[in-house]
Image (cartoon, grey):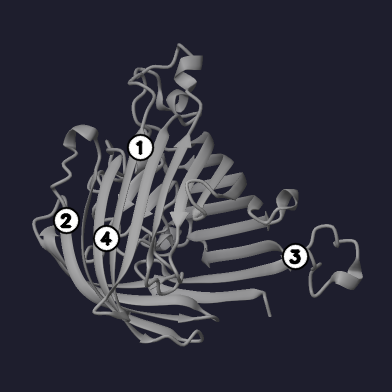
Amino acid sequence: PNDQIELSGGWGGFFGFVGTVGLTFNNFSIKNIGNFDKWDPLPVGDGQKLSLRVQANGRSFQNYSLSLTEPWFGGKKPNALSFSFNHSVQRQVDFFNRANFGNELGFFKITGATLGLAKRVTWPDDYFSVSNSLQFQIYEFDQFGTSFGLSYPTGRSNSLSINNTIARNNVDNPIYPRFGSNIMLSTSFTPPYTSLNQNLNSESSDEEKYKWLEYHKWMFDASVYTPLFGSTKFVASARAHMGFLGSYGNRIGLIPLERFVMGGDGMTFNNFALGQEIIGLRGYENQSITPGRETRGTANPDPFGGVVYNKYVMELRFLVSPNPSATIFLLTFAEAGNNWGSYKDFNPYDLKKSAGVGARIFMPAFGLLGVDWGYGFDQIPGETRRSGPQFHFTIGQQFR
């Protein structure tokens, strides 16, 4: 009764059907692996959380992930020790040339592992938590590097980063919050490799500069929920999101990976973006508010993705059904955001605006499902037309 099975599928875009299978065991036990009396169907008894997940679209895209969390590390529940492994691959498959139909033209793979420790703290108050993790990732390109603005199509990059998150969360309900706020600051730092290798500079080849990725990243998210009209059925939700990607000096500049991709539903599930931060903006097509989109795949591509973004959201929500087995609420929204490829172009007042309506339904067997209709009031970068009306489908809670 405490475990979960996820079976979901989606259809859209050129890739067609994407399926997901996930298993979560919330009472797993490592020490009982050798005690078959404790298997039901896996060893149970210690409250550890084991999650397995596979997401695939034939040969074009696959993602495999495994995570294990020990919430009682050190004998205290607020300390959560976790380990996760992830492998993702995106392939370019020839669907246009009849003679080579289905042949692989190239791929981009990410393989990574993360070791983390999270803890609830009582200062400044009881709602704060702190988490730290060490992450190692390998990026492999085969005829795919130019899609990110690299000068070489085939190669490999590595990333070793320390990630820190400070959060304060006192919302009363994770599905339909009525009171409280959720504020989070996340940072990522890699070692300053250019300081350790004086031969690296802007004139070095991309293979040398990006063999080990060097960057620091800052992301801030804040959400506030307030009941209206003296009733918790009407709730105003105000959110702000910001992100910055930086470098240690100007010797090699900003890296072409780990950038921000904006537009659409904000789901990696739909746009298969790897090595990037996905930021939704309803009323606009997926990835449409992303610098470098126009030159992607050309002979002289620009780096794909932004290095700084802002996004602001205001929602008015109405609770239709509070039933835990089928929580339903409606919403109307207005939001604005933009994504810039360099700091000299950054203008916090130059925002792409949209508004629309939507609905959400939460069912324990499927999670939170949503549909939005949004109208984009501004032009898509690189095009002369307004974005106009767009439909968006979402799975799960969208935090950015």
- Answer left or right for 213 relative to 310: right
As rendered, which of 334 and 5 lies closer to the eye?
334
Q: Residues within 10 Å of mark 1 (few under 14, many from 20)?
A: many
Mark 4 and 2 residues: CB-CB less than 8 Å, in contact? Answer: yes
Q: Is disc 2 placed on a helix, strand or loop?
A: strand
- Answer left or right for 85 relative to 46: left
Residue at mark 4 to residue at mark 2: CA–CA distance: 9 Å
Q: Residue at x 42, y 58 (%)?
A: 272
First in sequence: mark 3 vs mark 1: 3
First in sequence: mark 4 vs mark 1: 1
Name the residue carrying label 4.
Answer: 281
**Quadrant where the N terminus is found in the figure:** bottom right
**Where does the image place residue 154, in percent across and percent down from the top left?**
47, 37
As rendered, which of 323 and 380 lies closer to the eye?
323
Residue type at mark 2 is Lys
Location of residue 96 (image quadrant):
bottom left
Residue at mark 3 to residue at mark 2: CA–CA distance: 46 Å
Mark 4 and 1 residues: CB-CB less than 8 Å, in contact? Answer: no
